[in-house]
Image (cartoon, rainbow, N blue to C red):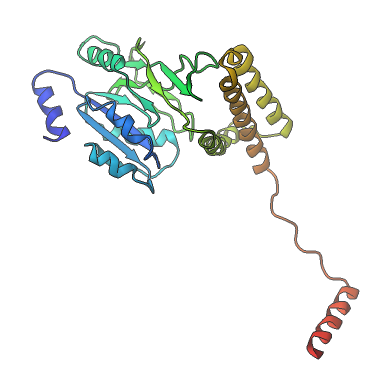
Amino acid sequence: MTSSDTIEMRRANGTASITAYIIAYNEENKIEAAISSVLWADEILLIDSGSEDATAEIAERLGSRVVQVEFNGFGNLRNSAISECRGDWIFSLDSDERCTVEARDEILSVIAQEDAADIWRVPRRNWFMGKWIKHSGWYPNFRQPQLFRRGSMTYDTLPVHEGWIPAEGARVDILKAAIWQIPFLDLSELQGKATRYSTLGSQKVLAKGGGRSMLSAVVRGCVEFTKHYVFKLGVFDGWAGFIIAFGAAEGAFYKHAKAYVSRLETLPPDAPAMSESDRNCENVADSLNEAQ
C-alpha cells in the first residue's frame, strides 16, 4: 500500500494523517537514522538536492518518496517540500535530527485533537563531542516550527536561517517532548557547515546593507563568542562549550567578512606596461635563445 493510499484511508476514517519531510544533501551517514525515527508517519518525503552519495537510494529503500529539488536557498527548499506533502499535518525533520518516542507519542496525540493549535515548536536536545549539551544556547533550542497543519504556515525565502510566516489566525504552541539533534559527527563537519552557512549568510548581510567594514566583522565575532560562552553558560559545557562558542564566533566573523570582501574590487590590476629598456632586454634574450 502506498503512502497516498494510507492517507486517503485515514481521511475516510476521519483520522488526521501526517507527512514527515526531510531535506538532505550528501547525508548517507545520517539519513537512515533520521528516517527510521519517523517510520510511524503516514508518508515520509525526502527532498534531495542532487546528492552525489547514496542518500536517495537509502531513503527509497526505507520506503520514502524522494523528490529532487534544486537548491536555491533553504527557504525556497522548504516551501518546495511542504508543497509536496500530502498529509493533513506536516512534521519537519532534518537529517541530523531524530524523533524520540516521547515526541512521537505527543505528536500523534496533538494531531488526533480537532481543536489543537495549528503550529507547534519543538525543543531539541543536542549531542556533541560525546555528551549531551546542557547550556551554550543549545538546550533546549528551537528552529522554525516543526509540526504544523498543512496550509498553516510557509517559509520566507532567505538563503539560510530562514524564518517562517504563519497563516492568518493560526495558533502556535510548544511541544513538551524534545527530539534529538546530532549536528556534527566530527569537527571537520562543523568547519564545512560553517563555511557553507557563512557564505549563504553573507548574502543576508548584504541584503540588509551590511558588510561595510572588517572591524564590524571582528566585533560581531567577539559578541557571539561572549554570548554563547558567558551569557549562555557555555563554560559549563567544558571543551564542547568552548568549541560551540568559538564556532559561533567564527561563523559570525566570516559571514560579515565575506560580505565586506565582496564589496571590494578583487580582480588584480593589469600588468604594468613595458618600458623601453625592458623591451630591449627581452629582445636581447630572444636573440640569445635563437643563437643557441
Q: Is residue 273 left or right of residue 193?
A: right
- Nearer-the-camera pick, 150 or 57: 57
Tell me residue 187's x, y (percent): 54, 33
- Left or right of residue 222, residue 161 in this image: left
Q: Quadrant of residue 146?
A: top left
In front: 104, or 155?
A: 104
- Say which residue appears at 63% left-offset and 39% top-offset: 258
Residue 67 coordinates in the image, percent (x, y): 29, 42
Residue 98's place in the image compared with 288, above or below, is above
Vertical placement of residue 224 versus 204, above or below: above
Indicate whether 136 appears above or below 9: above
217 or 139: nearer the eye? 139
Quadrant location of the C terminus in the rendered image: bottom right
Query: Going by the picture, which residue comes out furthest to the bottom?
Result: 291
Marker count (numbered)? 0
Counting from the top left corner in percent of width and height, residue 160 is at 49, 33
Q: Visible in this render: residue 58? A: yes
Residue 26 location (% of width, % of height): 40, 42
Quarter where residue 78 is shown: top left
Tell me where residue 23 sits by quadrant. top left
Look at the picture and state if 284 lies above or below 103.
Answer: below
Q: Quadrant of the N terminus?
A: top left
Q: Is residue 199 left or right of residue 100?
A: right
Residue farthest toward the front in the current orientation of the protein: 130
Q: Is residue 68 visible?
A: no
